[in-house]
Amino acid sequence: MDETEELIRLCVRALVSQMNAAPGIELHMTRNCVLGLTDEPLADFNRLIVGRDPDAEGFLVRSVARARERGRPLSAVLSPHVAQTLAPVATRLGLTAVGAAPLMVLRPDVPVPPGRPTKVVRALGPELVGIAGDLIAAAFGTPRDVIARCIDVGMTETAGVETYVAWGDEAPMGAVSVTPTGDTAAVSLMATPPEHQGKGVGRALLSRVIDDYRRRGVRRFHLGATEAGRPLYTSLGFERVADLPVWVLDPPVPA
């Protein structure tokens, strides 16, 4: 298996951990594909990953049908190994291509430059979970009640997703989530609200978290970057492995 498909398989497993506490969660998966639907009418909380799979086309078709049955929008990411074959199918099913997400990896032994000294605390307990949720909602412009239902509920000791908050100037300024699987960990929800951006808090938080996980035996990290976030990740030693085509299924129009 090449590295892209290996990382997509790990993304499938991470997405299950990240979504399984959301209300109305419905999960369908194979080893290389996953569909996660929730009660939320937002595409970011209804996700599809299609990797190289013997039934990739069938999984895509069934996933779109199920999203339509539930009246949900859908954000879909395709492996580059199946994207060309599935593009006509996706178009026929009503999905729209909206770009690509760089899949990036930080390999073992790549040194990560330290950031400024920063207090970093894992978000456990009502107060810290609330702070982390506030930061995530502000950073991504998502309604706070949606974050509470879908993300706050997963910040527990045993959820499999670990969220951290960074302080600066005696106030919380950023958050990030990590989902470890063996010696590899997925990085997600890198959240710095607009008023705190450009102050080095994201770099300080992520470099500190990576260092801590390396001490715990994690050797490799991966993430799906936005173009805005890519320069930070590159400066910390992440490299692009592939560009994953992103498609969106719009919600149904009310009659």
Image (spheres, helix red, strand yellow):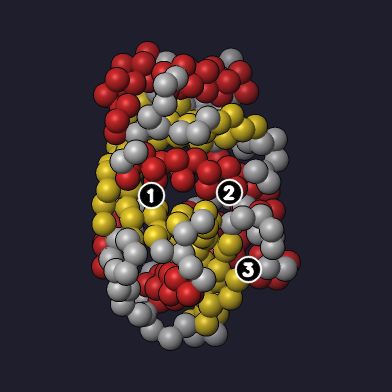
Q: Quadrant of residue 159?
A: bottom right
Q: On the picture, is 91 further left or further right than 144?
A: left
Whole-percent x, y for residue 41 in the image = 59, 34
Could you give the CA–CA distance between mark 2 and mark 3, rounded to whole angstroms?
A: 15 Å
Quadrant (top left, top right, bottom left, bottom right) of the C terminus:
top right
| Dot placed on the residue nearer the N-terminal end, 2 or 3 | 2
**Residue located beneath label 3 in the image:** 123
Whole-percent x, y for residue 171 in the image = 55, 80
Residue found at x 52% / y 54%: 181
Q: Quadrant of residue 105?
A: bottom left
Residue 89 appears in the picture as rendered = yes
The reply to whether the C-beta atoms of the residues labelled 2 and 3 are less than 8 Å apart is no
**Residue located beneath label 2 in the image:** 18
Q: Which mark is residue 224?
A: 1
**Mark 3 residue element:** loop
Could you give the CA–CA distance between mark 1 and mark 2, rounded to whole angstroms?
A: 14 Å
| Dot placed on the residue nearer the N-terminal end, 1 or 2 | 2
Residue found at x 39% / y 45%: 7
| Dot placed on the residue nearer the N-terminal end, 1 or 3 | 3
Could you give the CA–CA distance between mark 1 and mark 3, rounded to whole angstroms?
A: 22 Å
Q: Choose between 141 and 40: the one closer to the eye.
A: 40
**Residue furthest front in the image:** 1
Residue found at x 73% / y 66%: 126
Q: Choose between 87 and 107: the one closer to the eye.
A: 107
